[in-house]
Structures are given as structure tokens and as C-alpha cells.
Amino acid sequence: FYQKIVDLEKSYRNCHHLFLNCMMTDPSIISTTLLLLFSSCAHSFSTPLNIKRNNAIVSKQIPGSRLSATIERDGLFWPSLSKHYDSNNKDVDDELLGGDFSHDPNHYEEMDEQEYLMTMTLDSVLKIYATHSEPDFLIPWQKRHQTTSTSSGFVIDVPGIGLRVMTNAHSVEYGSVVQVQKRGEDEKHAAVVEAVGNECDLALLRVDSLFPPPNEDKAPPEGVRNKTSNRNKNDDDENLTYALPLGPLPALQDEVEVLGYPMGGDSLCVTKGVVSRIEMQEYAQAGARLLAIQIDAAINPGNSGGPVVNEEMEVIGVAFQGIDEESIENVGYVVPVSVMRHFLEDVRRHNGNYTGFCHLGVDICFLENVAFRNYLKLGVNNEDYPESVNGAPKRKKRVTGVMVRRVQPTSGSYGILRNMDVIMAVDGIPVGNDGKIPFRRGERVDLSCYVS
């Protein structure tokens, strides 16, 4: 009997001390335990493999671990097939029995509306592989060593153009080879950089293998449909392409989610946060100052180009940069949806070409100094107010604005504005002495934001 205990120890080392304790207390317990363990060893299973050899498909059995048959395919280590497939259904393709359940015809029917929308949104986020060939400006007849990078992108419907993949401009900068990969798939699709906006750090990619060009003589390809306007899950299939809709500009403390493929793993990553600030920021790609959203969700290398969505799964921006300093935490910046719409409208108007953002073309000087305002005779204007309003004393209207220091000769303002002019309002919106205008309640942005 002791020899049986020694043999059992070699196969089940983790249970050795338990058996010894049981034998010391009650020998009948250990005999019952041995009977159960040896019966479970008889149910050991093997792993089936399909192998292509000499143009023929053969099946091989790889011996597996000695696990009890009760935990085989029960979802403990691998998703259970019984949840998605009927073993008596002969119409199910054998190739689908390898564990990829995204092709289950009943996959979408088992979801509720919220789960379905979340799944389609995540499937629209792509991983982008780029090979960069940067030029050598000191030796212009040759290029530097090639580098590779991974980033994120998402499917969007551009009016008048079709389905495209939007990402950051720095993600495909000097890209000699650009490929995209869908979530849960191993195939990479070649992409062509169609439009690049370095000012706003946005780019559009055309993927002909995923979104074939429209042909008036042929019907749209099966599986390539835009579901932005109609979110009905009953007429979808596994190859459906879902274009993410654009949402409104978020407010402070609105909850957002960042979707993408950051460093630290290969699968899709989702991080949550709130909107912390909305104001003008300098975009590192080209040094332009445009409107940007600050969030406290993690934005790491690889998140660039990924969508930032609200609770309704609408895109409110594109993740593009952060602050890499030890003293600063939880600061990430997002290209807002207003800048995205401007970029898309510019591309649509110019047949797929990007032309840029508008600029006033002047250098301004703030008028926060009281003596300077008095020199320009910017005092208080009381002409628009009566002597009293409902018995209250007469109010004073502040006259504010910024002074034009120089007009760039190549701008549209040349010949219209002159030096020492004071810009007091734009489209009826008063300009403050600090060069900012009201944006929303409690928020102010630079005058250049409205002009651009």
C-alpha cells in the first residue's frame, strides 16, 4: 500500500502531503481517493490537429495533459463550443471548430443592443503597421535606415469619398509600406496614404482589399456596408464593415474611452477616463496651435490614431499625443471632433486632397496694460446704455480687443488690416484683451481657433 503512495507522488506531487495526512487519520479515506484519481486518469484526452501534408489534409492526435474529462471543453481553459454550436449540426464547417467563434451565425443574435454596438465598434478599430523611410537632409540622395512602428486607426465614412481608415499623420509619416489588420484576424491588408494633414496630425488611408472602389455597373460587395445610419443587428454578418459615427464635442467631466493597440500587448486595449480640459494646444507634429481635448485616460505609444468614444460609442476625437515628464501624470491629448470635421470637409471639397487650416495672417499684441489702452483711447463706452436700468445705476461697457502689430504680406488680411488696428470683435463675438473669445460657459479659446 505504501508503494502505491510513492507511485502516486510522482504524478501528483502537489497532493502528496494531503494523502499522507488522510492516511494518518483514516485509511479508508485514502483508499477512496486513490480509486477516484485512477479513474480520472483513464479519461485523459488528446489534442486534435489538422495538418496539410503533400496536398492532403490529415488529422493527428497530440497527447494532452492528464486532466479529468469533466473539465474538457467546459469553458474553464477555452471557450466552450456548446455555447455557440450544436454538435448534431452537420452544416457547421469543421474549420470553425478551432476556437474562433466570431464566425458563428448566431453570434450577433445572442447579443443585446448595447453589447452588439460595443462589438461592432471594437471591430472597427484596426492595427496599423508602418515601415518608415525617412530622408536624410544632410545627404539628400539617400535615405536613413528604415524603421517600423505600430499604431491604431478606425473605419470612418467620408461623405462623397467612401469608407476610409483614419489615423494620425505621424503614424504613417514617410511610410514606404503601410498595412492594416482587423481585430481577431491574422491577415494584413495593404493600405495607401490618401490624404495627410500635418497641422492637425490626421491622415486617411485607402484599403482596396477591405473597401473596394464603388462600381456603378455592379452592386456593392457583400459584407462592405456602412452601418452608421442603421444599427440593425438582424441583417449583419461576420464580414460587416461598421463605420464609426462622429459625435458632438464633449463637455467637461464627460466619460470617454480610448480604443487602440498600445505597447504592452498585441490585442485591442480599452482605457477609460474623463474630459479634463478643452483649449488650444500646440500639436507636436507641425507646431500648429489648434483646439485639443485633454483627458486623464492612459494614452501610450501605439494608441496614436485610435478613436476616443463617448457612452453612445460615437467618436469625439482621435488620440495623438501626451506629455512625457515624470512630474506630470494622466495627461493625454485628443484631436477634437470639430478639427476632424474640418479635415474631412477639406478633403471632400478638394477631391481627396488636404489644403490646410485658415489663418488670419497677422501678429497681434495683447492690450492688458492700462496705459497702453489709454494711449489707444480704449476707455469705457457708455453710449449703448441708458442712465439707469430699472432703478439700477448706470453700467459701464468695457472696450476690449487686441492690436495688430504686423500683417503678413502673403495673407488674405494684407491690404485690409493695417498696423495699430485694434480687433474688437469677430462675427459679433467680443475679443478680450488677452486675445481670447467666449467658447462655452466658463471656457475661452484663442481668436485663432474661431478663424481656423
Image: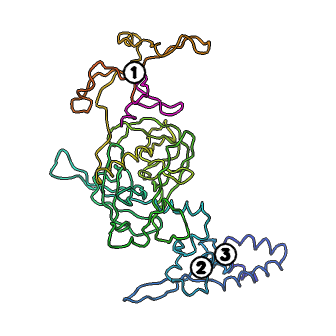
**What are the residue bounds of the magenta stretch?**
427-452
Q: Which residue is mark 2?
A: 85
Q: In the rendering, at what x and y percent does residue 76 appear?
A: 64, 71
Q: Amino acid at mark 1?
A: Gly
- The picture places residue 198, in percent across and down from the top left corner, at 32, 45
Callout 3: helix, strand or loop? loop
- The mark closer to the camera, 3 or 1, is 1
Whether the residues at callouts 3 and 1 have beta carbons within 8 Å, the answer is no
Q: Secondary structure at mark 1?
A: loop
Give residue 47's mark.
Answer: none
Q: Position of residue 432 (x, y in %)?
A: 43, 23
Q: CA distance from mark 2 to mark 3?
A: 35 Å
Q: Which quarter shows the C terminus?
A: top left
Question: Is residue 140 depicted above or below 216 in this figure?
Answer: above
Crowding at dot 2, Cα within 10 Å, few <14 / some 14-19 / many 20+, comes out as some
Query: In the rendered view, would you say 431 is above or below 452?
Result: above
Where residue 451 appears, as percent x and y from the top left, is 36, 34
Q: Quadrant of the N terminus?
A: bottom right
Mark 2 touches mark 3? (CB < 8 Å): no
For residue 55, what is the image quadrant? Answer: bottom left
Q: Earlier in the sequence, mark 2 or mark 3?
A: 3
- Residue identified by numbered label 1: 401
Among the 4 quarters of the image, the one containing residue 113: bottom right
Query: Compared with residue 130, is residue 291 higher up or lower down, i.e. above or below?
Result: above
Q: Which mark is residue 12?
A: 3
